Image (cartoon, grey):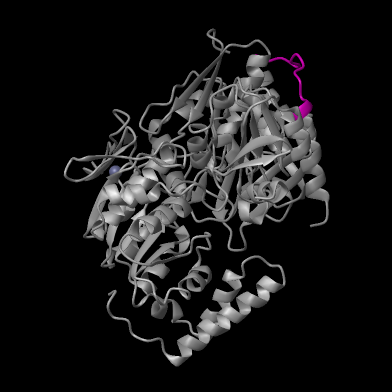
Amino acid sequence: MADSTQPLSARAKFAVTAGKAAAAVSRAAGRGSGSVIGGKVALRVDPELLARLAGHLDVVLVSATNGKTTTTRLIAEALRAGGPVVSNALGANMPAGITSALSGGAEARYGVIEVDEKYLTTVAEDVHPKIVALLNLSRDQLDRAAETRMLAERWREGLQDSKATVVANADDPLVVWAASSSANVVWVAAGQEWKDDAWSCPACGGVMHRPDDTHWACGECGFGRPAPTWVLSHGQVIDPHGSAWPIRLQLPGRANQANATTAAAVAATFGIHPQVALQRMESVAAVAGRYDVVSYQGRDIRLLLAKNPAGWLETFSLIDPAPAPVLLSVNARGADGTDTSWLWDVDYTRLAGRPVAVIGDRRLDLAVRLEVANVDFGVYDTLDQAIAQLPAGRIEAIANYTAFQDLRRIVGN
Amino acid sequence: MSTSGLRLVWVYPDLLSTYGDQGNVLVVERRAQQRGLRVERVDVRSDQPLPTSGDIYLIGGGEDRPQRLAAERLLRDGGLTRAVENGAIIFSVCAGYQIIGHEFINDLGERQQGLGLLDVISERGTGARCVGDVLGDIDPQLGLPQLTGFENHQGITRIGPAARPLAQVRLGNGNGTGDGTEGAWNGTVFGTYMHGPVLARNPQIADLLVKLTLDVNALPPVDDRWYEALRTERIAAATAPA
Ligand SMILES: [Zn+2]
């Protein structure tokens, strides 16, 4: 694929130019990077543009509920060992944003593309990926998204006819079910702390049994955990030969070690050695502001994004131990989903014993949630008021999507 | 109430806990404990028999396929029906609400038999999904303040003569029948479309369930400051022009 550098047709070239012009206008008007609007214009001019732009690339698609932006970044860093990479690094992960990102990739060898879960199948049809990396699937944005199992079913149907190698998390039953329609799967034991969307067997509806921390199997039909060839174990990647390679990321947390393990498995399919891949991943310090430590009002604040119950759970496991102060911010605007009931699926008792300050549009929903969890907290109207009340120490600020963007804007990140 | 304390049964969290309805369990548990009651919480998965000696049974919402499976397993188990005969309280939400009625439309588009514990029949609406904040007046017989909740469903539920609407909506859709009714109740059996979760938005309903269990008219007060602040905000948000 990489050597078939067919020149773009006149129409495709015009579409790319039109898209770039629209993006420039959008940027000038102060509407962000303009990548999405640019992609929309370009796709209108040439609906097959995405397929054309990807034609000369070895494409990796990355999809999941959580961790896809970070994993995309880690894979991109690893693959740069093998040649130039084009990627939608800023997380614009629907067809327009992807088109816009790829339009800058004429010289690239690899396309590493984060895809929204709902668009995975359609984008895969357009770009003929070599690799599809699937990390996890869990509840997210309840009032908008399709049901979680329906998404898995859509993946399953889409992957059935794909020639791609699927690199999939053996520890997430929904992902395993989706991936196992494919003829060629590399199973990665990447772990999955969140289990509440997979107690019911995706294949038959039977009750899932979990005899220990690792294994799972349906009590009815026997659908169970496949044997992995790549394993995350105590901060090391175990490759298919059984060799262990230490993960030394700047990014914190178990979930990012899982992302690195998947990224190493993807890189290996392109002949990049895990040691080389993992070393390259060490350069990643923050991804679109996530994990950044900023200085604001004389305080250090670490910015952490958690959009759904599974994300909050992984975040609680990486924050500094008590008595490190914690700031929580939750909104329920369009991009967040307007229903806040997911807060009740997050185990906030994990914050007991810490100083907790609460802000955001839906701080009162969070206040009731924390009251019921018997966690001490204070509620504040603004970030400045909140941090003035928090005791000394680096503040772990955890926010959902638009609340995170608000935080970044306020602290000037 | 059983001698061991208040026995709170969460029905089928493996199938029916998609929309944060676990919060209803947590709110009842917390508010009962704050009144000095010892709470025994029993989470019953769908491959386990339902105890028949519980005091309060909470059934949550869920996706379409798990709803079908839950109804099949509850019907086969029979424990919930015996629990109601023993005087237990049932509080059900959305998919759970439909299941305890006479019938509903399942994910295969078929009519499916429910438990018949509440005189309601559900079907699937053909219009837009009902999503958003709801405000309503609760049945005066229950003596409770305004109902606030969040709805997210496509169901239509019609109430038969043996049940009464839980509330009359001022804003939102509720049962989706166009007559402004929301939820249903009869004796100790309650159903609602309200998420939020509904007992976090309406702690007085949680207290009602505890009072019915203890057969008392009042409970010692607890600090409702944050609940009241949230209620005031959500009621104002529901009534504000979009
Ligand atoms: Zn099964």
Q: Farthest bottom residue?
A: A10
**Residue B139 position within the rendered picture, expressed as x and y whole percent measured from the top left:** 76, 36
Residue B120 in view here? yes
**Residue A297 position within the rendered picture, expressed as x and y whole percent measured from the top left:** 74, 38
For the record, the magenta segment spans: B214-226
Nearer to the camera, A278 or B120: A278
Residue placed at 33% from the left, 54% from the top? A178
Secondary structure predominantly adopted by residues drawn in magenta: loop
Q: How many marks?
A: 0
Q: Farthest left residue?
A: A241
B4 relative position to B240: left or right? left
The question of residue B222 being in magenta is answered with yes
**Residue A127 position within the rendered picture, expressed as x and y whole percent measured from the top left:** 37, 72
A280 relative position to B219: left or right? left
Residue placed at 65% from the left, 65% from the top? A32
Nearer to the camera, A317 or A155: A317
**Location of residue B46 (image quadrant):** top left
**Location of residue B123 (image quadrant):** bottom right
**Location of residue B142 (image quadrant):** top right
A131 relative position to A360: left or right? left
Residue B144 in view here? no
**Residue B134 position within the rendered picture, expressed as x and y whole percent measured from the top left:** 73, 47
Q: Quadrant of ligand 1?
A: top left
Give the vertical position of A219 relative to B104 (above or below): above
Residue placed at 54% from the left, 84% from the top? A17
